[in-house]
């Protein structure tokens, strides 16, 4: 079950961590590929940009989850299960 509107649970935090690390690793691999193909050397500010890309991806995910309801719709309140009374049979 997804977390409710304007709240986060531990599953969201764990997913944020996975997304941030994956984003940073993929951005780092792309940066390393560019370094190896162009002959440049990898410097510290490039690694900072890679970490920033991962962090931005993670923050974007948290903002999306914060404004989603319990079924994943953006900017709407939670949907509660409605039970209808049984229809009488004749």
Image (cartoon, rainbow, N blue to C red):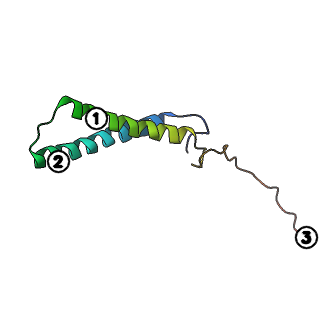
Q: CA distance from mark 3 to mark 2?
A: 74 Å
Residue drawn at 67 percent across, 43 percent down? 77
Q: Earlier in the sequence, mark 2 or mark 1?
A: 2
> How far across and how far down the image is residue 17, in percent?
38, 36
Q: Which mark is residue 90?
A: 3
Residue that extends furthest to the bottom in the rendered view of this protein = 90
Q: Which type of secondary structure does the marked residue at label 2 adopt?
A: helix
Q: Residue furthest right?
A: 90
Q: Is residue 19 left or right of residue 76?
A: left
Q: Where does label 2 land, which residue?
A: 33
Task: Give the foreground label among 3 and 2.
Answer: 2
Q: Nearer the viewer, residue 49 or 6?
A: 49
* Residue 49 quadrant: top left
Callout 3: few (<14), some (14-19), or many (20+) C-alpha neighbours within 10 Å? few
Q: Residue at coordinates 12% horizontally, 47% vertically from top-left?
A: 38
Q: Is residue 58 left or right of residue 73?
A: left
Whole-percent x, y for residue 33 in the image: 17, 47
Q: Is residue 71 left or right of residue 85?
A: left
The residue sitting at 51% across, 42% down in the picture is: 64
- Of the numbered discs 3 and 1, the one sitting upstream in the chain is 1
**Disc sitting over residue 49 in the figure:** 1
Residue 52 occupies quadrant? top left
Marks 3 and 1, Cα distance to the nearest angstrom? 71 Å
């Amino acid at each position: 079950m997804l977390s409710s509107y304007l709240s986060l649970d531990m599953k969201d935090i764990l997913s944020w961590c996975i997304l941030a690390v994956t984003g940073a690793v993929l951005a780092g691999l792309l940066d390393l590929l560019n370094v190896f193909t162009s002959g440049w050397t990898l410097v510290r500010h490039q690694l900072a940009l890679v970490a920033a890309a991962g962090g931005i991806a993670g923050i974007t995910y948290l903002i999306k989850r914060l404004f989603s309801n319990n079924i994943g719709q953006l900017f709407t309140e939670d949907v509660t299960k409605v039970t209808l009374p049984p229809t009488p049979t004749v």
